[in-house]
Amino acid sequence: MIKYDIIIIGSGVAGLTAGMYSARAEKSVLIIEENFLGGTTATLENIENYPGFMKINGFDLIQNMVNQCISLGVQIEFCSIKNINYDKNIVNCDKNMFEYKSLIIASGTSPVKLNLKNEDYFKFKGLSYCAVCDGSLYKNKRVIVVTKNLSAEHAIDYLSNLTNDLTILDLSNNYQNENLKVFHDVKIVDLIGEDRLNAVKFISQGNEITLKCDGLFVELGKQSNLKLFKDNLETSYNFLVTDENMHTIIPNVFVAGDIRKKNLRQIVTACSDGAIASTEAIKYLNSIH
C-alpha cells in the first residue's frame, strides 16, 4: 500500500490547484483521476473570464496546471475508485490501495455513460467522453458521436472540422443535421473490438446495425456521482456540504469544486476552493504532528 500526506480525488482545476498548493508545502500528494485530466474545463474551446488571459483554450489551461503539479512532484494515478474506508484512511482502487492522512474530494461532475458491460474496457482504446480533449487523435478517421437531444452539439461541431467521416447516433429523435449521417431512436447494444474499439452495434427504428469506426465519442452530458461519499458525508441536492473553509463532518476530509454545494460554479471559484481546501488540509496535518 502506498501512503501519501494528501490524496486528491479529481483532476479538474480545483484538484490541480489543491495539488499545487499541497506540493508547495512539501507534502506528498497523489491525484486520482478516473476519466481524463481536467474534467469539464478541458472540454471548453474558449475561456474568456479567467484572470490573466484574454482568451485561452481549456485544454491548454489544464495542461499548464498539470505541468505545474508534475514539476512540484505531484503523482497522478488513473484508476476507478471502488470504495473509501474513512476510518482507516484508505482509498481502494481497481489497481491499487492508497493510504492518506488527509483527503480532498474534487471529483466535480463525471460523464454520463452508456452503461454497457465492456464500456470501461474500451475507455482510452477508441472510446472517449471528451471531443475537445481527444478529437485530434481521430483526424480524418471514422468517428461516431452519441448524443441525446442536443447534448453533443458542441462536440459534433468540433469534430466536423477534423473528419469528413462522422456519424451521429441520437438516443432521442431530436438532433437534425442535413450534412451528417444521423440515426434516430438509437439503442446501443454492444461495443465491438479486441485490443481497441472498432465497431458499434445498435438498434435504430427497429433495425439492428453494426457500424465500423476508429473512435466513439459519448457526449451525453455530465452528472455528479456521490456514491463514494453520500453514506459518510453530508449531502444536499446531489452536492456535498462543507463550511466556508471546505471542511466536512470528517476532520481530515475536505471538498472543493463543482461537487460542493455553493452558489457559483466557475473556474476561478473552483481554483479558490482548491487553494482553501489544501491550506486547511495542511493545517490539519500540522496539527496532528
Image (tube, grey):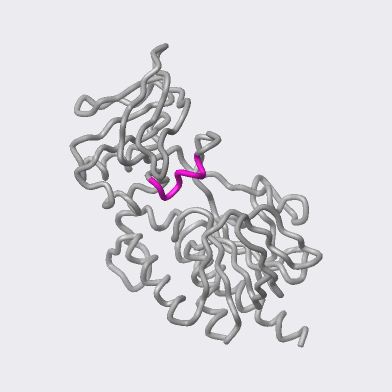
Image point (66%, 45%), residue name: 237
Is the C terminus in the top left, top right, bottom left or bottom right quadrant?
Answer: bottom right
Image point (26%, 47%), residue name: 138
27 relative to 126, above or below:
below
Residue 274 seen in this snapshot: yes
Can residue 179 be found in the magenta stretch? no
Q: What span is in magenta?
A: 119-125
Q: Percent x, y for residue 50?
A: 37, 66
Q: Residue furthest top?
A: 206
221 relative to 202, above or below:
below
**Total numbered badges shown on the rendered structure:** 0
Q: Percent x, y for residue 42?
A: 39, 57
13 with respect to 137 (left or right):
right
Q: Percent x, y for residue 166?
A: 25, 34
22 with respect to 188 (left or right):
right
Compare residues 236 and 35 and report the one nearer the observer.
Answer: 35
Q: Percent x, y for residue 224?
A: 58, 47
Compare residues 142 and 159 and report the one nearer the observer.
Answer: 142
Residue 161 seen in this snapshot: no
Residue 175 occupies which quadrant of the picture? top left
48 with respect to 268 (left or right):
left
Image point (54%, 81%), residue name: 23
14 relative to 114, above or below:
below
Is the N terminus in the top left, top right, bottom left or bottom right quadrant?
Answer: bottom right
Image point (57%, 57%), residue name: 107
Q: Residue furthest right?
A: 87
